[in-house]
Amino acid sequence: MAAGVKRAVARVNLAAVQRNCARLRDALTGGAELCAVVKADGYGHGAAPCAEAALAGGATWIAVAAASEAAHLRAVGIAAPLLVMGALTPAEVDVAAAAHADVVTWDEPFVAVLAGRRLRVHVKLDTGMGRLGTRDLDQARRAVAAIDEAEGLELGGVMTHFATADEVGDAFLGEQLAAFKPFAQEVKEWHPSIVAHAANSAATLREPRSHFDLVRCGVAVYGLDPFQRDPGEQGLEPALTLRSYVAAVKPAAPGESAGYGRRWTAGEPTRLATIPIGYGDGVRRALTNNADVVIRGRRYPLAGTVSMDNITVDLGPDADVRPYDEAVLIGDGVSAEEWARRLDTINYEVTCGLTARVEREYHRDD
């Protein structure tokens, strides 16, 4: 095998992550700070390396969804303030406390679960997302009071989450802001040192009024466009490329097929390249006959069903493609946003879907 060839590798440019965070930080208003969200293994990019790059780019907080994610970051030496945003079982509360991570509540019963541990707690008001948090303003106030009275607990912040920030022109973001701002101001009157936070990546870029004391940016940290268009429009650099290689090249005569179910058949003489990557690596089966791969700087279409371990591409009759040539699935002009459009999904899901079988390789502008 040619030296340096790898079956499937996601190359992550940590310098791009750092620059994206610097760009986001520079957009903040009113002294707001940047919290980089590295849940789901950094949206598939690698939580710890991306957390370090984000902090170098000006982030001052790191957020995750699960207590185990916080424990991992502490174990590898991340010392910044950590926020666990997701729901926690009593056992997970112990994990979060051991990691010295802030946690989230929205009612008095869970405050009672937390009591007795040394924890900073953020109260979540549901202003329209309809998931975690309370819609009842009085219940949120009671949760704040219960934290004040509980042994070992300290109020760390108040928060909400936007449902439509990535839908430019939608009025619901303004409605959610109008519901959250008075609550945040009320609590900060009595607790001036807490942080109020609401904005995700889209809100951070779209609406300065949403910045408050802290913004929680996830997808934009990795150079993905929260509006599902073009990261360059937002001054963001995609950090991840997905690469494989050409394992075999063979001719295909008219009428010959490729892949399960014979969903592609040659209409004229051509050549097929087999690339050893598939849905077992995160190349979704719905990309069958519906994506391009870049080889030697030229796009070639997928030909036939995406299988667990292999895809095939139609090279045409005259392409200068040989075994061990690099094959780029994301990068070189093919974006996660393009995959998302073809799959009728979002770029978050594309990168989060890259499996552990894909090696992560880190570099800085190499």
Image (spheres, helix red, strand yellow):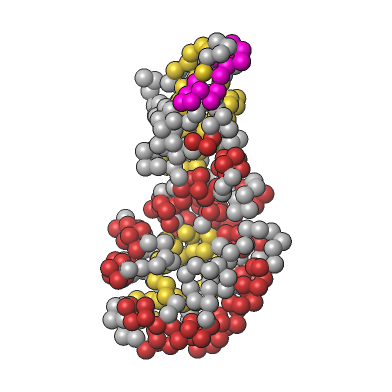
Based on the picture, tell me whether residue 267 belongs to the magenta stretch.
yes
Taking the image as drawn, is residue 123 in sight?
Answer: yes
Residue under the image location 51 percent in, 57 percent down = 218
Based on the picture, tell me whether residue 264 belongs to the magenta stretch.
yes
Residue 78 location, x and y as percent? 36, 59
Taking the image as drawn, is residue 15 in sight?
Answer: no
Residue 83 against residue 308 in the figure, above or below: below
Residue under the image location 36 percent in, 58 percent down = 69
- Of residues 235 and 94, the one drawn nearer to the viewer in this rendering: 94
Residue 126 location, x and y as percent? 53, 73
Residue 38 against residue 29 in the figure, above or below: above
Furthest residue toward front = 261
Furthest residue toward right = 169
- Of residues 108 and 223, the one drawn nearer to the viewer in this rendering: 108
Image-quadrant location for residue 266: top right
Q: Which residues are magenta?
A: 258-271
Residue under the image location 41 percent in, 32 percent down = 308
Residue 95 location, x and y as percent? 29, 66
